[in-house]
Structure formats: structure tokens, C-alpha cells
Amino acid sequence: QVQLVESGGGLVQAGGSLRLSCAASSRTFSSGAMAWFRQAPGKEREFVATITRTGGSTSYAESVKGRFTISRDNAKNTVYLQMNSLKPEDTAVYYCAGRFMNVLGSAPSRYVYWGQGTQVTVSS
């Protein structure tokens, strides 16, 4: 079973940047697509970004396109989310998720293993 551990969250002012990391416990990590989701208080979990096994294809939510960048280093079993030009509406708990199929997807139900989440708070 793959375990995921996110890190890098914190408090940042609007316009600032953060880089989230998600470390996987297993080489199985490198077999499928990975994604980031987020959940704000009182809201449903929403898709942020996803990346294929080799990093050759990515997809982003419209709300973060041009500001966030997803990447991965399979040698380190790690996926990243670089977040720039942060806005207060980006405040949420950010979750890393993975699936065994190498197919991009934005639905949480497509992902079979999840991290515990890391809080990102953007002040205005």
C-alpha cells in the first residue's frame, strides 16, 4: 500500500508563493498519474492539478492555470505543486492523491491513495 505525506504548507500573504511536496512510500508511486486536490471549509474537495507517470502531460483547474505548476521526480518518489501569485481564495487543505493507471483525471473517486493534507492559508 502506498502512503503519501504532504509538506510545505503554511501562511503566506496574497501574491506570495509556496511549494508543496508529496513523498510516497513505495515505488508503485511511479506507475500511475498523481494529482493535487484541495478542500476549503464548508466546501467539497476540488481538483487542482494532475500529472502523468513521466510528467509528459499535465492538466489544471481553470482557477489555478498559469499560477500553479505540478511536477514529479520519480527517482525521489515525490510530486510537487509550485504555487505562485497566491490569492485568499486559494486557502484550503491541499491533498496529494495517486492512482495506478497512467491516466489524467479530475474526479477524486479516480484516485485510490491519499495523503493526510497540508494547510495553506493566504492572507489578504
Image (cartoon, rainbow, N blue to C red):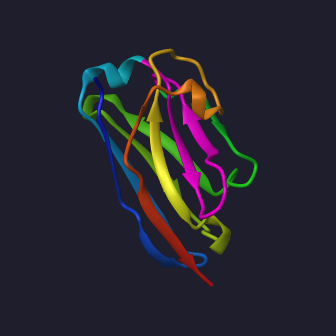
Quadrant of image for the N terminus: top left
Horizontally, residue 112 falls left or right of residue 47, namely left
At 65% from the left and 33% from the top, the residue drawn is 106
- Report which quarter residue 74 is drawn in: top left
In-front residue for pair 117/20: 117
Q: Position of residue 111 (x, y in %)?
A: 51, 28
- Vertical placement of 5 versus 86: above or below? above
Number of dots carrying numbers: 0
At 70% from the left and 45% from the top, the residue drawn is 61
Horizontally, residue 104 falls left or right of residue 121, namely right
Horizontally, residue 13 falls left or right of residue 20, namely right
In-front residue for pair 5/60: 5
Quadrant of image for the C terminus: bottom right
- Report which quarter residue 25 is drawn in: top left
In-front residue for pair 69/45: 45
Q: Position of residue 29 (x, y in %)?
A: 35, 25
- Report which quarter residue 10 is drawn in: bottom left
Range of magenta residues: 32-54
- Vertical placement of 93 versus 122: above or below? above
Outermost residue, right direction?
62
Outermost residue, bottom direction?
124
Q: Is residue 33 magenta?
A: yes
Q: Position of residue 79 (x, y in %)?
A: 40, 40
At 56% from the left and 46% from the top, the residue drawn is 37
- Vertical placement of 19 versus 124: above or below? above
Q: Is residue 65 magenta?
A: no
